[in-house]
């Protein structure tokens, strides 16, 4: 199974590399088709789950053992609300990654934030309805004839809507994963290109070179794809590596959000006037400060939550349990070294 997953993953990365290297137009077409397919799929899923409901919303989210429903295998309302919140949090990363392509759109400073907020609201509301209606339509897992069923949402959709319909929705999920891979790959390429353009990576000149034919940084695209395939290959011999890399990547993404909102909050109290462009293309107005404070609190919670040394996530060995913190400290030290090295080098040249 592991070899099959690695092979399929490598094929997906190769396809993503080719599409990203071909240019933004092809990527945009596939992304738009993917978004439309996901929207239609989630709307249809919401309707079908609602039509097959077995209990009320209150019975679905409140843990009532004495109600005679036999529905005792699902979490109570607090976990339901936490799952809804986490859905929006992880969705944010996907839309934010897509937003990194904003430099290649018209008026990105104005349109990108609005598009991300609108997408988040839609995804958050749709995710809430999916979770709620899924719990309302879920079968009674306490029935002996169902046996030992596991598999999360895919199992639930198949058991409620049938094998054929369930597989159709799984195909939509697979397509969504492909589109997500394209967006994340593209975002990573743009990040590598931007750091190369600013001179903060080895071989910066080559990494920041844009092909005149495809208008994409081809070398950065190839290196990102190659790096992902190498991680998959290493996972064949060291299965825990993939889980560690995934967890640490999620931590670093949330850590990046934390840094952004922390610096933004600092600038609200002590503005940085060093030749900054003060013309706001997008503004939250009077809501800016409270939203910024709440964002910092939430980002802090996410950083702590993701990096917490859980055995289920990181394993029993101490160097795996604390891998997120160890690698994060190493990353910060490496970043500080590169920053001051480049700074000293530039002063020496000048």
Image (spheres, rainbow, N blue to C red):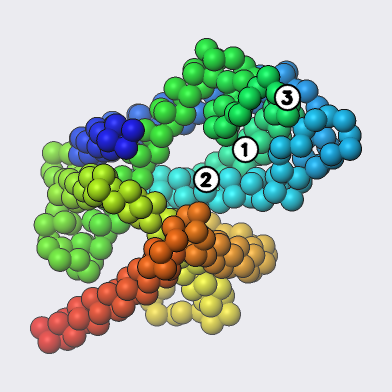
Residue at x 52% of width, y 76% of height: 267
Q: Helix, strand, or loop for circle 2?
A: helix
Position of 256 with respect to 22 (left or right) is right
Q: Secondary structure at mark 1?
A: helix
Q: Is residue 80 visible?
A: yes
Badge 3 crowding class, 10 Å Cα cut-off, few under 14, some 14 to 19, many 20 or more, is: few
Horizontal relation, residue 60 to residue 226: left or right: right
- The residue to which callout 3 is attached is 143
Q: Could you tell me which residue is drawn at 25 percent across and 63 percent down?
A: 195
The one of 196 and 232 positioned closer to us in this rendering: 232
Q: Position of residue 10 (x, y in %)?
A: 25, 37
Question: Camera-side residue: 23 or 278?
Answer: 23
Identify the image quadrant of the N terminus.
Answer: top left
Residue 127, numbered label: 1
Name the residue rendered at 87%, 30% in the picture: 68
Q: Quadrant of residue 276?
A: bottom left
Report crowding for label 2: few under 14, some 14 to 19, many 20 or more residues within 10 A (C-alpha).
some
Q: Which residue is mark 2?
A: 91
Marks 2 & 1, CB-CB < 8 Å contact: yes
Of labels 3 and 1, earlier in sequence is 1
| 64, above or below 50, in the image | below
Secondary structure, mark 3, is loop
> What residue is at 49 percent from the left and 65 percent from the top?
309
For mark 1, does the 10 Å Cα neighbourhood hold few (<14), some (14 to 19), or many (20 or more) residues?
A: many
Label 3 – label 1 distance at C-alpha: 28 Å
Residue 273 or 187: which is nearer the viewer? Answer: 187
* Residue 31 appears left or right of 6: right
């Amino acid at each position: 199974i592991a070899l099959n997953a690695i092979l399929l993953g490598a094929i997906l990365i190769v396809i993503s590399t080719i599409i990203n290297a071909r240019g933004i137009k092809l990527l945009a077409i596939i992304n738009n088709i993917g978004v439309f397919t996901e929207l239609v799929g989630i709307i249809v899923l919401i309707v079908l789950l609602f039509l097959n409901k077995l209990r009320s919303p209150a019975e679905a989210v409140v843990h009532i053992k004495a109600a005679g429903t036999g529905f005792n295998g699902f979490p109570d309302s607090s976990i339901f609300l936490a799952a809804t919140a986490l859905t929006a949090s992880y969705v944010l990363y996907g839309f934010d990654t897509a937003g990194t392509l904003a430099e290649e759109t018209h008026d990105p400073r104005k349109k990108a934030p609005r598009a991300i907020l609108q997408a988040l609201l839609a995804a958050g509301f749709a995710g809430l309805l999916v979770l709620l209606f899924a719990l309302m339509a879920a079968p009674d897992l306490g029935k002996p004839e169902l046996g030992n069923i596991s598999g999360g949402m895919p199992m639930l959709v198949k058991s409620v809507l049938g094998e054929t319909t369930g597989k159709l929705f799984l195909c939509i999920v697979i397509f969504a994963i492909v589109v997500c891979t394209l967006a994340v790959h593209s975002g990573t390429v743009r990040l590598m290109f931007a750091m190369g353009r600013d001179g903060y990576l080895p071989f910066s000149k080559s990494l920041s070179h844009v092909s005149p034919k495809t208008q994409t940084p081809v070398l950065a695209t190839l290196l990102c794809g190659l790096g992902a395939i190498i991680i998959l290959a290493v996972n064949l011999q060291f299965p825990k590596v993939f889980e560690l890399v995934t967890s640490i990547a999620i931590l670093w993404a949330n850590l990046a959000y934390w840094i952004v909102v922390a610096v933004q909050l600092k600038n609200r109290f002590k503005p940085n006037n060093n030749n900054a462009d003060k013309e706001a293309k997008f503004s939250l107005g009077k809501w800016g400060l409270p939203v910024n404070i709440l964002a910092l609190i939430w980002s802090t919670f996410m950083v702590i939550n993701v990096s917490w040394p859980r055995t289920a996530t990181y394993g029993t060995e101490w160097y795996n349990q604390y891998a997120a913190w160890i690698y994060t400290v190493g990353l910060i030290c490496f970043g500080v070294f590169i920053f001051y090295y480049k700074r000293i080098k530039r002063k020496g040249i000048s």
